[in-house]
Amino acid sequence: MNFQSIIRGMTQNHAELNDKADDPTLRPIRSTGSPSEVADRITDWVNTQSNWQIISRDSPNESGEIALHLTRTTGLFQFVDDIHVRVVDDDNRGASRIEAESQSRVGKGDLGQNARNLRELTGAFR
């Protein structure tokens, strides 16, 4: 952990998967299957995690995209973070792209928890 990471952790409470992220574990991922199939796998995974919960799952929109609202509760202080996931068709190649962002509900900084939330989520599908 470097000085910039410490400052970021004390002043930012949001992280997102981004194609240009310096950290490759914070880039959107592709998973085989339709958006509906991938959203089902995300739902199944969340249901096996004690500190994660599904708040909502939208029906596919006209382009087949599915949005999920998840939460993750931290262990020590029981802070709740909101994770918004979009599963989109990857140009009809039989795969879907998982995009996500995580935001803390409280505080000015997350000490890196939101990035860890995204790594935990995407790590289950790498």
Image (spheres, rainbow, N blue to C red):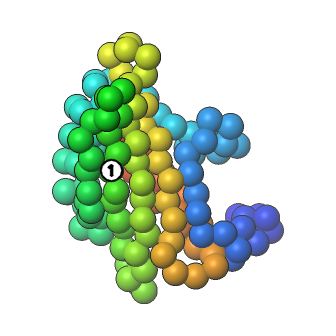
Q: Is residue 37 above or below residue 101?
A: above
Q: Residues within 10 Å of mark 1 (few under 14, many from 20)?
A: many
**Picture quadrant of residue 126:** top left
| Residue furthest right in the image | 3
Q: Is residue 89 above or below residue 108?
A: above
| Residue furthest top in the image | 93
Amino acid type at image mark 1: Leu
In percent of the image, x 42 and y 59: which residue is there?
83
In percent of the image, x 34 and y 57: which residue is there?
69
Q: Position of residue 100 (x, y in %)?
A: 47, 48
Left or right: 110 in relation to 42 = right
- Using the rendered image of the protein, determine whether residue 31 is visible from the camera's viewpoint: no
Task: Look at the numbered disc 1 and give the secondary structure of its residue.
Answer: strand
**In front: 63, or 98?**
63
| Residue furthest bottom in the image | 77
Q: Position of residue 93 (x, y in %)?
A: 38, 13
Residue with the mark numbered 1 = 68
**Picture quadrant of residue 92:** top left
Left or right: 39 in relation to 30 = left
Left or right: 83 in relation to 12 = left
In percent of the image, x 26 and y 57: which residue is there?
56
